[in-house]
Amino acid sequence: MADTPLKSTALTAVHKALGARMVPFAGYEMPVSYAGLIEEHKAVRSRAGVFDVSHMGEFEVEGPGALDFLQYVTSNDVSKLFDGKVQYSCLPNGQGGIVDDLLVYRRSSDRYWLVVNASNMEKDWNWLQRHAVRFDVHMRDISEATSLLAVQGPEVATLLQGLCSVDLGAMEYYTFVETEFAGIPNALLSTTGYTGAGGVEIYVPNEHAEGLWKRLMELGIPPVGLGARDTLRLEMGFCLYGNDIDDTTSPLEAGLGWITKFSKDFVDRERLERQKSEGVQRKLVGFELLERGIPRQHYTIYDASGNAIGEVTSGTQSPSLDKAIGMGYVHTAFSKPDSEIWIGIRDKKLKARVMALPFYKK
């Protein structure tokens, strides 16, 4: 059987024209870097950069039963949202794991927007549709028609202010507005980036993506690829689906108890409530290497006696901190900050130290 051809975003040709290094990612052909990962990473931490993350999925959820539906399928408490507010959450899978992590946007009391990971779009859609039949709700997948540019960095509000009438600097974290932006009617701007550097994410119909990208380039905002997006999110200790969380990891093991609210009924509530009371056997931790090397996904984690106690889920050489950092699951006894662990890299076991997250502090 022939391989499924990679999908393109509305900006794929633009990235190629800029000389970006393109790679397959979540079924799309995506730019991993332009000028180089370290340069792009530091641009975002110090000033600004723009990512094309149009591969992400967007689902509209509307109807009188929208709130009840989302309360049941997501782990967080959607009733706490108000118009213009965003919430980080996850979809429990009914077996103690996670279908996906996602953002929930409240547009009105019966209109919501879900933003999901590209690699899980079909799985998420099928899971949500399976449960939607019990509620008075209608869903629409607008992913293929929507482009998303994440403009990240401490100077973004100042750089973009001339393109809209909304006071970008006054927007609180995890809020959004729908407004005219750079001449585009009804663009959706949200302060929800996954880099820890501040900034906005801009959702527009595909036909406006190239014009918007051009305006951002004219403002001197450099393009940034998925390579730096990964190192930026890892410095903040943010989970990446497929690495740090998946269908086999519980939100409590992953340190996501803060988005798991037992004040309501939801998929897997009883199982997770029991897990909370009994305690988890393993936990996701951050660590720094104390010897030279770079940890990678699936490397084994050991204790001082050489016993395997876990596995690395994400790892990199941090451009901001100039040291090797990573995350991984370990037996709970080794999860406290300053615990000594060892990472198996090739034929060596390199000493590491468990750290409180985030690694990077402003």
Image (tube, rainbow, N blue to C red):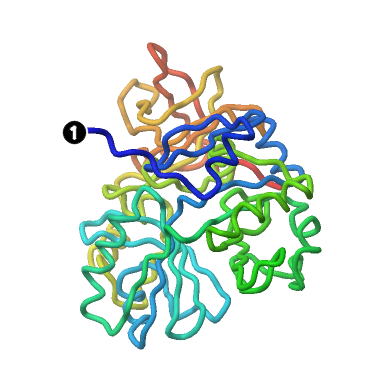
- Note whether 80 is above or below 212 in the view shown: below
Residue positioned 58% across, 38% down in the render: 15
Q: In screen coordinates, is 70 left or right of 289?
A: left
Where is residue 170? Give x, y as percent.
Answer: 75, 70
- Note whether 276 is above or below 83 in the view shown: above
**Can residue 105 be seen at all in this image of the molecule?**
yes
**Can residue 353 be seen at all in this image of the molecule?**
no
Q: Nearer the viewer, residue 339 or 268?
A: 268
According to the picture, the residue beneath numbered tag 1 turns out to be 1
The quadrant in which residue 345 appears is: top left
Residue extending furthest bottom?
64
Residue extending furthest top?
347
Q: Nearer the viewer, residue 15 or 194?
A: 15
Residue positioned 41% across, 13% down in the render: 348
- Note whether 254 is above or below 257 in the view shown: above
Q: Name the kind of residue labelled 1 in the image.
A: Met
Number of other residues with Cα within 10 Å of mark 1, as a class: few under 14, some 14 to 19, many 20 or more: few
The quadrant in which residue 184 appears is: bottom right
Q: Nearer the viewer, residue 174 or 189?
A: 189
Where is residue 58? Give x, y as percent.
Answer: 43, 63
Q: Secondary structure at mark 1?
A: loop
- Number of labels in the image equals 1
Where is residue 5? Give x, y as percent.
Answer: 34, 38
Q: In screen coordinates, is 191 left or right of 69?
A: right
The quadrant in which residue 57 appears is: bottom left
The quarter in which the N terminus is drawn is top left
Where is residue 60? Give x, y as percent.
Answer: 41, 72
Residue positioned 76% across, 59% down in the render: 160
